[in-house]
Image (spheres, rainbow, N blue to C red):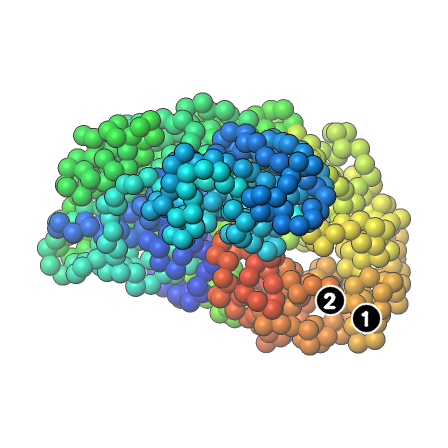
């Protein structure tokens, strides 16, 4: 059984700098982290101002969270937008199947025109998708491309109404309304996205026949096409007036906003106390929202927080239940689905619809209520108790809210808490597991909130100290831009995981492959993520590997190489990914096992898994030098053979096994495999050499790629590859950079930001490291696709190519890991 609390050097640093002031981050984030608990309970602000848009989940689905400060009789909205209520004019496939015509062969002529003859097309029910795409798929679509026509009939004119096309797509989509192009996504994916029709377009939606036509191109992996129409309800806003935002500052554990509300100052801080050496805090499903109010004159002030059931639903249309309660000195408001289908939904762009979302705050001058958004907001604006209107105007859809009234004469500080009790978090080979915070089922969410409330002041001070030390240390190591990128990456990476305990007592930190296919425990996602966890707590690095070892050692996975994943989140019942990555995943497991040994300075963990490590190593010896046609972690680039960077991974994996053998006193084994690795490395140099650089593939001269896998040879001083290889590559890369970074290879202008940090770490000096990292910071600061930080982006324009909110940004921390290893 893993200890519930681990104390390490991080806590020492925090104690020493408890009064430190954090250096403000100047990074304009693509999206700002607000609530970061796990892949399901994750919320972001997608605009520069906290009140500029509705708070959203990383899938871009609305997670309405409204904040309003009332000063005297004037209200100031400081967080979120008043979510517009809509009704479905044409339902999406998730709500109800719809009839359409489709073809997977390129049609001739204007196939998107209303009068086009589609009699030769097939009939099917939307949505259309690959079988493993999402639960919304009603008609199987296996081909690369699909053309769809959805006719519909209006029984009234829509002129003057606010109308949106709503659509989901994986991958690229083009949508037409009555022959006019409305959406052209380019290379992207999305779920339940909306585009507002112009007044001119809406005026053409007259009574009678109409057509939505769409084209979708599945460029790899899952495919999905779905489209519908929603119309805004004519409901007036209650809080049109906004606060004046003064600043925003993203730190590792906290996001700070400052506002001016009339003559009153307001500071809002979102805190996720994710101290990686404290497993209880890592797993605790509660975050803080602090509010500090200052006024030079006595003022009567009230604060209002409101959330919608969306937080606990896959679709807003699902039936929900909401209620309030009081326990101890805390008031609770909770909401959840009526059906509670525990662990019955899996996939990438889906939201949890079991368990309950909570708002909680002090009972001193506080109040909680449930009901329709208009009823709650009107009561607050009028100075009435929101508890008195509970249930009013809800139409079966009850929002939850917390308010507190107080008099400010100088300063007033307090907080609320938000959290989620998911009841069961993961299904692991048929067994339902609770979150680590309630592993034995004896804890209650109310007790967890109470403890969090008691620890609030202590944890805020610790978080402040952590953030201050973080910015100081990371700036000293990699520069200010590097520190700001890592601060933005910290909570994102952690919140893309769920911490649970396996039936045998092993700790498991299970990632969700957010926005890239929804796999759980993906090894080639673990690999780039690992530096963050190796740096702060090797126990969590083990927790990223334990389930893959168990999968092979149980006999459930019988292939001579490591699995890609153990299922589709949150169902961890065995690999569901359609293809294997034999060299990739085996190399990943071997390298990370050695990395753990280096951080712990012993190889007991490797000894426990020696038999399977040997099997994987022998596979790499036979198949790793010149890999055949297969995928690597950059699977979006497709299959290709003779991958020089993948070959490096195999060689470093074999070298890692040799080093582990030496640590375990297996001298003959160590000598044998070290000789093999060095011989392969020498052959690699000859095979990949292309003059002033090294090739992308052994068989193609004039190609190049980032050789980021070689970073481990440098970090661990393994001595496998000649030092001049790295020097040659770094010099060559500096000639290939674009405005927003170094491309992944010569084939495309896109890159992976995590791999850039690995490549940069191969440089010998800080100045060169910063030459690679600053363009990545420049990209994030100017990115026009506003989503949680992407790791797959273009280097010649400030647009993400794909992916968002993924754990792999933990790879940014490899520079810090290098420093820690050097200090051993």
Q: Residue at x 23, y 45 (%)?
A: 238
Q: Position of residue 2 (x, y in %)?
A: 56, 36
The relative height of residue 472 versus residue 136 in the rendered view (above or below) is below
Q: Position of residue 218 (x, y in %)?
A: 67, 46
Horizontal relation, residue 480 to residue 812: left or right: left
The relative height of residue 366 versus residue 431 in the rendered view (above or below) is below
Q: Residue at x 69, y 36 (%)?
A: 120
Q: Which residue is mark 1?
A: 702
Crowding around mark 1 (Cα neighbors within 10 Å: few <14, some 14 to 19, many 20+) is few
Horizontal relation, residue 218 to residue 59: left or right: right
743 or 191: which is nearer to us?
191
Q: Is residue 276 visible?
A: no
Q: Which residue is mark 2?
A: 746
Q: Is residue 53 visible?
A: yes
Q: Secondary structure at mark 1?
A: loop
Task: Tell me how far mark 1 sits from mark 2, CA to CA.
Answer: 9 Å
Q: Residue at x 76, y 49 (%)?
A: 631
Q: Position of residue 94 (x, y in %)?
A: 52, 33
Q: Residue at x 45, y 55 (%)?
A: 31
624 or 74: which is nearer to us?
74
**Total residue callouts:** 2
Crowding around mark 2 (Cα neighbors within 10 Å: few <14, some 14 to 19, many 20+) is some
Quadrant in which the C terminus appears: bottom right
Q: Are marks 1 and 2 in contact (CB under 8 Å)?
A: yes
Question: Residue 739 got which mark?
Answer: none
Q: Position of residue 767 (x, y in %)?
A: 59, 76
Quadrant in which the N terminus appears: top right
Q: Secondary structure at mark 2?
A: loop
Mark 1 / mark 2, whichever is N-terminal: 1
Name the residue at the left extreme.
298
Horizontal relation, residue 73 to residue 108: left or right: left
């Amino acid at each position: 059984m893993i200890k519930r609390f681990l104390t390490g050097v991080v806590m020492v640093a925090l104690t020493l700098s408890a009064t430190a002031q954090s250096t403000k981050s100047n990074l304009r984030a693509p999206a700002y982290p607000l609530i970061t608990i796990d892949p399901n309970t994750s919320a972001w602000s997608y605009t520069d101002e906290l009140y500029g848009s509705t708070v959203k989940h990383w899938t871009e689905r609305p997670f309405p969270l409204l904040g309003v400060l009332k000063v005297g009789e004037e209200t100031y909205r400081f967080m979120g937008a008043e979510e517009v209520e809509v009704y479905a004019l044409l339902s999406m496939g998730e709500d109800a199947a719809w009839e359409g015509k489709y073809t997977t062969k390129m049609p001739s002529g204007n196939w998107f025109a209303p009068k086009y003859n589609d009699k030769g097309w097939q009939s099917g029910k939307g949505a259309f998708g690959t079988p493993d795409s999402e639960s919304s798929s009603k008609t199987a679509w296996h081909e690369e491309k699909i053309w769809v026509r959805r006719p519909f009939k209006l029984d009234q004119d829509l002129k003057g109404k606010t109308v949106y096309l709503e659509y989901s797509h994986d991958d690229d989509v083009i949508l037409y309304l009555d022959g006019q192009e409305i959406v052209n996504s380019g290379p992207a994916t999305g779920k339940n996205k909306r585009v507002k029709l112009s007044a001119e377009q809406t005026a053409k939606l007259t009574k009678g026949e109409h057509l939505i036509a769409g084209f979708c191109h599945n460029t790899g992996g899952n495919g999905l096409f779905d489209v519908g129409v929603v119309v805004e309800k004519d409901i007036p806003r209650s809080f049109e007036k906004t606060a004046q935002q003064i600043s925003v500052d993203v730190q590792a554990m906290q996001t700070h906003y400052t506002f001016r509300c009339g003559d009153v100052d307001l500071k809002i801080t979102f805190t996720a106390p994710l101290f990686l050496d404290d497993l209880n805090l890592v797993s605790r499903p509660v975050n803080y929202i602090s509010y500090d109010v200052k006024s030079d004159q006595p003022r009567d002030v009230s604060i209002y927080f409101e959330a919608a059931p969306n937080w606990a639903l896959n679709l807003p249309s699902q039936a929900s239940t909401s209620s309030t309660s009081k326990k101890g000195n805390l008031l609770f408001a909770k909401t959840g689905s009526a059906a509670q289908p525990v662990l019955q939904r899996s996939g990438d762009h889906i939201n949890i619809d079991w368990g309950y979302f909570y708002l909680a705050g002090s009972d001193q001058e506080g109040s909680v209520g449930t009901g329709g958004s208009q009823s709650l907001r009107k009561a607050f604006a009028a100075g009435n108790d929101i508890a008195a209107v509970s249930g009013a105007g809800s139409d079966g859809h009850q929002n939850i809210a917390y308010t507190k009234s107080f008099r400010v004469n100088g300063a007033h500080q307090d907080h609320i808490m938000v959290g989620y009790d998911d009841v069961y978090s993961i299904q692991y080979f048929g067994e339902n597991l609770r979150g680590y915070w309630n592993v034995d089922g004896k804890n209650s969410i109310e007790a967890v909130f109470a403890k969090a409330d008691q620890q609030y002041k202590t944890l805020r001070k610790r978080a402040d100290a952590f953030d201050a030390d973080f910015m100081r240390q990371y700036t000293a190591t990699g520069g200010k831009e590097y520190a700001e990128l890592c601060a933005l990456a910290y909570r994102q990476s952690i919140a893309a995981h769920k911490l649970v305990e396996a039936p045998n007592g092993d700790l498991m930190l299970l990632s969700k492959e957010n926005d890239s296919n929804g796999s759980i425990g993906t090894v080639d996602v673990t690999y780039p993520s690992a530096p963050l966890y190796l740096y702060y707590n090797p126990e969590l690095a083990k927790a990223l590997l334990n389930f893959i070892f168990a999968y092979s050692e149980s006999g459930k996975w019988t292939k001579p190489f490591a699995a890609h994943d153990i299922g589709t989140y949150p169902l961890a019942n065995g690999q569901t990914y359609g293809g294997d990555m034999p060299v990739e995943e085996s190399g990943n497991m071997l390298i990370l096992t050695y990395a753990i040994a280096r951080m712990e300075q012993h190889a007991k963990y490797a000894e426990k898994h020696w038999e399977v490590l040997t099997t994987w190593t022998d596979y790499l010896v036979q198949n790793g030098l010149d890999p055949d046609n297969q995928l690597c972690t950059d699977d979006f680039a497709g299959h290709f053979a003779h991958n020089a960077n993948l070959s490096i991974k195999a060689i470093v994996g074999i070298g890692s096994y040799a080093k582990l053998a030496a640590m375990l006193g297996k001298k003959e084994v160590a000598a044998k495999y070290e000789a093999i690795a060095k011989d392969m490395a020498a052959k690699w140099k000859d095979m990949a050499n292309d003059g002033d650089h090294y090739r992308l593939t052994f068989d193609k001269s004039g190609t190049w790629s980032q050789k980021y896998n070689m970073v481990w040879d440098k970090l661990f001083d393994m001595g496998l590859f000649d030092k001049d290889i790295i020097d040659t590559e770094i010099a060559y890369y500096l000639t290939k950079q674009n405005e927003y970074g170094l491309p992944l290879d010569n084939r495309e202008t896109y890159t992976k930001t995590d791999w850039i940090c690995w490549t940069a770490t191969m440089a010998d000096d800080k100045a060169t490291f910063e030459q690679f990292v600053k363009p990545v910071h420049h990209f994030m600061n100017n990115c026009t696709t506003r989503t949680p930080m992407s790791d797959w982006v273009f280097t010649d324009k400030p647009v993400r190519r794909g992916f968002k909110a993924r754990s792999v940004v933990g790879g940014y921390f490899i520079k810090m890991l290098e420093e820690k290893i050097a200090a051993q």
